[in-house]
Amino acid sequence: MNPIDTPAWRALAAHAEAIRPQHLRELFADDPQRFAHFSLHHDGLLLDYSKQRVSADTLRLLREYAETADVDGWKQKMLAGETINHTEGRAVRHMALRAGEQAPSEVQLVLSRLQAFCERIHSGEWRGFSGERVTDVVNIGIGGSDLGPRMATLALAARQQPDITVHFIANVDSADIAPLLARLNPRTTLFIVASKTFTTLETLTNARTARDWLLATVVQESAIARHFVAISTNLELTRQFGISPENVFEFWDWVGGRFSLWSAIGLSLALAIGWKNFEQLLAGARAMDQHFIEAPAAENLPLTLALISLWNTNFLGATTEAMLPYSQSLHLLPAYLQQLEMESLGKQVDRDGNMPGIATSPVIWGESGTNGQHSFYQLCHQGGRIIPADFIALRENDFPLPGHHTALLANCLAQAAALAFGQTAEEVRSTGITEDLVPYKIFPGNQPSSTLLLPNLTPYTLGQVLALFEHKVFCLGALWNLNAFDQWGVELGKQLAGQLTPLLSGEGDASAFDSSTRGLIAALKG
Ligand code: F6P
């Protein structure tokens, strides 16, 4: 299927001609009930998409295109365990990880092992080689084996378990791990080596450094068993690394790295917030799964987010989408969503091996509010580009200090309104400003945004939100006829890095490389 060739896509393209010139000011003036007409409530969440540049007809046409693209059919294939990740020959079953009593037995087994392990760490039953209890846990992983637990540990910091600190190391740059190791005590530190493949250069380099650091204090290799556990699908490589099988928590190739927070990859998070809270995270995601599976298109939150993203990207010409959580706790959510959306959807070749030549994943970026207001919002307001935004706000905050939360929420609403409605020349003049400054004070507005309002930030609501975005990605994959579950685009750089490593150590012949790379090698070697 080439989306462009479908009647539903063509109908959207024609309709976009009529919508593009309209300003959100007019759309709101024409419909006093616009908020009610373009917002959805579900299980405590509110999605207000009334500030998107859409009409009722837009939504109708978008949903017709969703039928053409057979989003529901693809959903059924995913649920049936079909090999929808066709380029890797894998099913896509991350929902099974949080299916509770419906979860497959192998999932339940690993969850019960994880629970038992968490309890042993928290109770102090698990001891390091010197007999001391674990005070620090270091998750060594990158990408999907890092971003999810790292982001969620920060988001749920109010639920941090006492007497244990969880750290995250990802970068192969020694500036990441070295300062941390300098602060830690090898007798009381537990390392979690988290890698789906157990071949990732960054993770294995850091894990070897951590192992050497431990063995510098204790000579017996047997101490590794008290201080290293692994999470992987590759049990052979974890064994070769020296981690005994009883210290390995398994997951499966039908879990994509960026969808793996719910698997054993969540161990560091579970250690940070406690097992009961981790279960609540799974429960929130499970509830969103149910909604995604059952809710009709007009009420379906993930599908609605996906259709809006498609509309902004393919019909209004947006190339980016800003994620703007008005929550310091969700400070890392944009980075997490970057991997989720861009690694899944940043592709041009469709499921049939063709290049239909349509824009796909927008560049996902963002920053927590209000910080971003003091850096990049200027461009959003007056830079002349269309920059759709997703505001995320919490009705209640985990850290209730007088004055803070109201100010935060007021800024969130203010920015969404300013972006949407702007400020006209007449409004500027009415402030009595000198005429020469008027052009500088005009805000064109008409910047589309949605606001996702959560009652609070709990493991349950975080689980809902993350599953919401996972399913948004799934829908966009179907809408763009892409396989959202492979990531071939990350491979070439890895191969070249493998070839360049010996060259930087002065071994081998660099002549196959271009003059720029050769020049840089020479400069680095001094
Ligand atoms: O290089 C990209 C990637 O493969 C991601 O898809 C993945 O989340 C990350 O690397 C880490 O991979 P692994 O968990 O196998 O170490």
Image: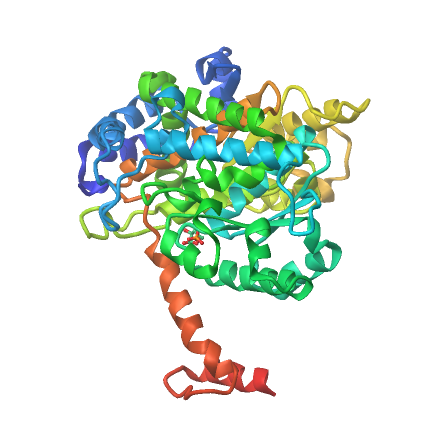
Q: How is the image coloured?
A: rainbow
In the rendered image, residue 455, in percent from the top left (x then y), is placed at: 60, 18
Residue 151: quadrant of the picture: top right
- 482 and 57: which one is in front? 482
Q: Position of residue 501 (x, y in %)?
A: 48, 76
Residue 51 located left or right of residue 121: left
Picture quarter with the C terminus:
bottom right
Asked whether 312 or 1 is in front, the reply is 1
- The residue shown at (53%, 47%) is 146
**Residue 390 in picture, x, y percent from top left:** 52, 33
The residue at 60%/60% (across/down) is 210
Q: Position of residue 122 (x, y in %)?
A: 64, 34
**Left-right relation of 172 to 83:** right
In the displayed structure, would residue 335 be above or below residue 10?
below
How many numbered callouts? 0
Q: Residue furthest right?
A: 402
Viewer-side residue, 305 vs 171? 171
Instruction: Let me know if residue 85 appears in the view.
Output: yes
Residue 387, visible in the rendered structure: no
Q: Residue at x 51, y 87 (%)?
A: 506
> Which of the 4 image quadrants contains residue 381?
top right
At horizontal 40% and vertical 72% (from top left) the residue drawn is 496
- The image quadrant where one finds the N terminus is top left
Q: Is residue 43 left or right of residue 90?
A: right
